[in-house]
Amino acid sequence: MNFYATKDPIKYEGPSSTNALAYRWYNPTQKVMGKTMAEHLRFAVCYWHTLCWPGTDPFGGETFNRQWHHAADPMEAARMKADVMFETLRLLGVDYFTFHDLDIAPEGNSLKEFNSNVTAIANIFESKMAKSGRKLLWGTANMFSNRRFMAGAATNPDADVFAYCAAQVKHCLDVTHGLGGENYVMWGGREGYETLLNTNIGQELKQAGRFLSLVVEYKHKIGFKGPILIEPKPKEPTKHQYDYDTASIYGLLKSYGLENDVKLNLEQNHAILAGHTFEHEIALASALGIFGSLDINRGDYLLGWDTDQFAMNIPEVALTMYEILKAGGFTTGGMNFDAKIRRQSIDPDDLLHAHVGSMDASARGLLIAAKMIEDGKISKAVDARYAKWNEPQNMAMLAGKESLDEIATRVHKSGLEPQPKSGRQEYLEGILNSYI
Ligand code: XUL
Ligand code: CO
């Protein structure tokens, strides 16, 4: 299918290139701290924004007029989208893609028909993947678009919806497993509520915990090796969403005993909707041992909703990459472009410019973050702040070897008087800017 004006794969041409569709910084084979850029960044193109969204907004209709949105046969449209996805990966030189079941195939008139449509397209993927060497970063089930999910998926007051969701996720996880998917994602867009007047929170949380446990049990049953990833978001579409942020999900995982099987897929725009920075969410997930993967995008700081723009702000991306490197890098995770072009960007090649720009910003961010780590000035300053914790007495205190009254006795005996030290924030911000 002829979709893009660009026909040849986009290449690395270096920072001085004047070609608008060339990588200036993303050089997949370039080594950074012992790994290639491709190994560090593990980019993925997402189906939903790239191929399914027609450019609508709450006040206006379709602007993109993609051919497949006007095909008479929905399976023919699905096959066109599959062709364009693999053409996008080829042109960008990106290894991974991601999808919701509903992105890749039409629902039909029953779950049985939906499952068989999903399987038919997955079979097409399988042969395209074998030919091209492209891979699936993750699959996920769309349990928020159809009206049956209007009051939630697993947390729906109607037990029939819970059971339906179990059947839908089972198939989507089977398909993801069959395609060698490296993770399986669950974003609970409607797992929340609009008003407490019609909601039993305690009951809904029990359902959420049971559903997640069922998915984890099934993952082990079929030998799916990758983690289940929950994607936090505080609101939109629901007013209050249970998977609010890293901290609240950690609490839920602990209470269900699932903290070793489930990790997080963190998204920049969701972090800022929750009142956090992206790097805060990554650093916290890493400290709690539940960091998994990223949906890389950018929210608008003036708007209270999920604008899902392509990440282009290099200093911000550098701070993201710094936390990723400190966390030890990705294992099964990667950087999924859960990002959409603006609805006025109606030329097919705008999709390529968006990905290339954001991949270059990520590569620059990676290089800056590597400098931050290798130079070590920032981490030295942090280590110095905590240095006293390495003294044997204080190590014992932290390890629980002293009781509150024993510590109090010691403090009185020694006449201990804490001496405040500078946090040196502006010094550190200056150091950071020297790397950018
Ligand atoms: C919604 C969102 C989803 C998830 C997958 O805000 O980010 O697209 O990434 O369901
Ligand atoms: Co997302």
Image (tube, grey):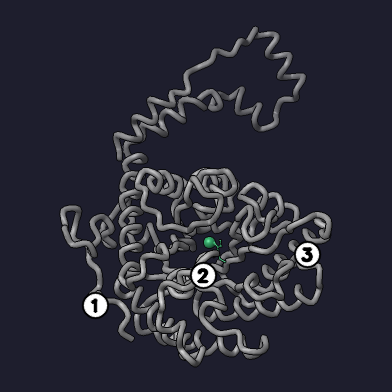
Within 10 Å of the Cα at label 3, are there few (<14), some (14-19), or many (20+) other Cα atoms?
some
Q: Which residue is mark 2?
A: 138
Query: Which of the image's four quarters has the C terminus?
Result: top left
Cα separation between marks 1 and 3: 49 Å
Query: Which of the image's four quarters has the N terminus?
Result: bottom left
Q: Amino acid at mark 1?
A: Lys
Label 3 CB-ligand 1 distance < 8 A: no
Q: Amino acid at mark 2?
A: Trp
Q: Along the line of sight, which residue is nearer the eye, 67 or 93?
A: 67
Q: Secondary structure at mark 1?
A: loop
Q: Which residue is mark 3?
A: 207
Residue 365 placed where, x, y %? 35, 48
In the figure, is residue 252 to the left or right of 393?
right
**Residue 284 is drawn in which quadrant?**
top right
Q: Which residue is mark 1?
A: 7
Height in image: 246 above or below 415?
Answer: below
Residue beneath the point at 30% across and 84% down: 2
Residue 64 placed where, x, y %? 41, 73
Residue 97 placed where, x, y %? 44, 71
Residue beneath the point at 81% across and 73% down: 159
Dot 1 or dot 3: first in sequence order is 1
Q: Along the line of sight, which residue is nearer the eye, 431 or 301?
A: 301
Q: Secondary structure at mark 2?
A: strand
For ligand 1, the image quadrant comes to bottom right
* Circle 1 or circle 3, nearest the eye: 1
Dot 2 or dot 1: first in sequence order is 1
In the figure, is residue 27 to the left or right of 264?
left
Residue beneath the point at 43% across and 47% down: 320
